[in-house]
Image (cartoon, rainbow, N blue to C red):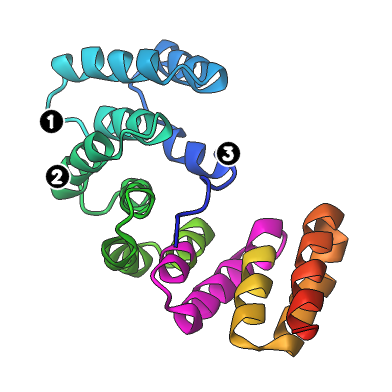
């Protein structure tokens, strides 16, 4: 299965929050992200990292830039260095797992995100991305469990409910999918319509 497009940008961009050692640096990061100027973001991170080679923040910023520009090999390399130096950086693990998934390595991504879920038990993004990795690896039962944990941690996250319901449709859990649809109708009617279509299509087969 081809990996799905990147999840909602604000989710991935949450890894940038608090990165940078000055207010000015954080402003540059935010500006490049808003403009989606990934080349400038990566260059800026590289320049800053020359001053602080051991700092993990700039590795995360660069890894995010490579991920968003779809240069997954460079993203994986940068983020692997960060997690090696700072194994408690859950955001870096999340980005690493997503880069691996987008690179067509869902099994490896699942292992990475399983580790992230141990150190980031309250991160709904970790469990959502883990669900994506399991789904792409064809492990739908585990995908359902991961998506379910994501929406337990953040019940107002529409994409989580949509992916949970979609995975339940695929494994024949109609009641679960309908429950997800009911929640989604209150949060995002457009996504609810898409999920409803999938439920009806499954029923008509």
| Quarter of the figure with residue 119 | bottom left
Residue depicted at x 37% and y 67%:
117
Element type at marker 3?
helix
Relative side of 2 to 112, left or right = right
Along the line of sight, the residue nearer the viewer: 195 or 14: 195
Relative side of 62 to 123, left or right = left
| Labels 3 & 1 near each other (Cβ < 8 A) | no
Task: Look at the image and give the residue range highlighted in magenta.
Answer: 132-161
The mark closer to the camera, 2 or 3, is: 3
Rendered view: 200 above or below 108? below
Crowding near the residue tagged with mark 1, few <14, some 14–19, many ≥20 C-alpha atoms within 10 Å: some
Magenta stretch, main secondary structure, is helix
The reply to whether residue 179 is visible in this rendering is: no
The reply to whether residue 164 is visible in this rendering is: yes
Element type at marker 1?
loop
Crowding near the residue tagged with mark 2, few <14, some 14–19, many ≥20 C-alpha atoms within 10 Å: few
Along the line of sight, the residue nearer the viewer: 95 or 100: 100
The reply to whether the magenta stretch includes residue 141 is: yes
Residue depicted at x 54% and y 44%:
11
Return the residue at label 2: 85
Rendered view: 194 above or below 103? below
Locate the N terminus and report the quarter of the image it occupies.
Answer: bottom left
Return the disc, 3 or 1, that comes first in the chain's sequence. Answer: 3
Q: Position of residue 57 (x, y in %)?
A: 29, 32
Return the residue at label 1: 54
Residue depicted at x 37% and y 28%:
65
Point out which mark residue 10 bears: 3
Locate the C terminus and report the quarter of the image it occupies.
Answer: bottom right
| Labels 2 & 1 near each other (Cβ < 8 A) | yes
Return the disc, 2 or 3, that comes first in the chain's sequence. Answer: 3
């Amino acid at each position: 299965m081809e990996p799905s497009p990147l999840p909602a940008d604000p989710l991935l961009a949450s890894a940038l929050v608090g990165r940078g050692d000055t207010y000015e640096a954080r402003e540059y990061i935010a500006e490049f992200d808003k403009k989606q100027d990934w080349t400038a973001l990566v260059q800026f991170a590289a320049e800053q990292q020359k001053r602080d080679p051991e700092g993990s923040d700039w590795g995360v910023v660069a890894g995010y830039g490579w991920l968003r520009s779809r240069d997954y090999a460079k993203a994986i390399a940068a983020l692997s260095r960060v997690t090696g130096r700072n194994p408690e950086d859950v955001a870096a693990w999340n980005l690493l797992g997503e880069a691996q998934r987008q690179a067509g390595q869902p099994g490896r991504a699942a292992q990475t995100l399983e580790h992230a879920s141990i150190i980031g038990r309250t991160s709904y993004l970790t469990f959502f991305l883990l669900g994506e990795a399991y789904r792409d690896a064809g492990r739908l039962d585990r995908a359902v469990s991961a998506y379910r944990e994501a929406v337990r941690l953040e019940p107002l996250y529409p994409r989580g409910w949509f992916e949970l319901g979609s995975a339940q449709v695929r494994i024949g859990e109609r009641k679960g999918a309908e429950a997800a649809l009911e929640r989604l109708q209150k949060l995002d009617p457009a996504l609810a319509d898409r999920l409803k279509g999938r439920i009806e299509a499954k029923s008509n087969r």
